Amino acid sequence: MSTSANLRNRYWVLRHGKSIPNEKGLIISSLENGRLAEYGLASEGVSQAQLAGELLLKELKAKNIPLENIRICYSPFSRTMQTAKMAASVLNIPFEGSQCKVMEELRERYFGPTLELLSHDKYTEIWALDEKDPFMPPEGGESAADVASRLATALATIEAEFQGCTVLVVSHGDPLQILQTILHAVNQSSESSEEDILSRIKGTITKSVLLQHRKFALLTGELREIV
């Protein structure tokens, strides 16, 4: 996708590297569990995160984008924090500095207490529900529309704080699928760019848009340019 005239920054997304929950086939989606070190990256995931950082560095050099223009925004889960930290290290950006920002709105989609710690085979039930109605949440969890709403808030914050930057968003499978879906819709929108960014993004949170989110799936450790 090309740069959107509607947005102030360029965006890349990075799904966290392969995690211990990925290896064990477990759903770890609550903020409480997600922060635990025991649910961080598997050794393969550390390698994936490093490779993603190296790929991004190569792309930035090819596009003549200076490293001081990079911002890394990441989910507070241990698996995403480790991935973001590795990418920052490869890019030689101080992780504790102003170029890196943890954002709770970028956290994993919460699949609800009845699915937490169960087999990830249960994801098929969630996606079937999404296909039926993306505004319908799993019991006690978040619908695709709920996630889109908080991602809209995150994007509005990023757009307000940064201008002319290349932003790497480090998050999780479902949130990044949904983020790409709404960013694609904003990019295709003919709405006036004078309207505030939050209103424009929230205007894309419709059933027809959200039904497309599975098309934007990412593998663990996969890096992708969006806008």
Image: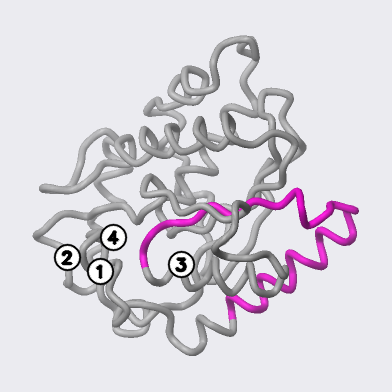
Mark 3 residue crowding within 10 angstroms, few (<14) / some (14–19) / many (20+): many
**Cα distance in 3D space between marks 2 and 3:** 20 Å
- The residue wearing badge 1 is 27
C-beta proximity under 8 Å, tags 1 and 4: no
Q: Which residue is mark 3?
A: 81
Q: Earlier in the sequence, mark 1 or mark 4?
A: 1
* Above or below, comparing residue 25 to residue 112 in the picture: below
Question: If you read the primary sequence from the N terminus, does the residue marked by circle 2 or circle 3 appear first?
Answer: 3
Q: Marks 2 and 1: in contact by CB < 8 Å?
A: yes
Specify which label sits upstream in the sequence, 3 or 4: 3
Q: Which residue is mark 2?
A: 116
Q: Residue at x 31, y 52 (%)?
A: 109
| Magenta segment, prevailing SS (helix, strand or loop) | helix
Residue in the foreground of this view, choosing between 125 and 178: 178
Task: Quickly name the residue at label 4.
Answer: 124
Of the residues shown, which amino acid type is indicated by label 2?
A: Glu
Which mark is first along the chain, 2 or 4?
Answer: 2
* Residue 67 image position (x, y, % from top left): 78, 57
Between the residue at mark 1 and the residue at mark 2, the CA separation in whole angstroms equals 6 Å
Residue 162, x across and y down, in percent = 64, 36
Q: In terms of secondary structure, where does tag 2 sit?
A: loop
State the residue at coordinates (24%, 44%). Answer: 142
The nearer-to-camera label among 3 and 4 is 3
Q: Amino acid at mark 1?
A: Ile
Q: CA distance from mark 1 to mark 3?
A: 18 Å
Query: Nearer the viewer's eye, disc 2 or disc 3?
Result: 3
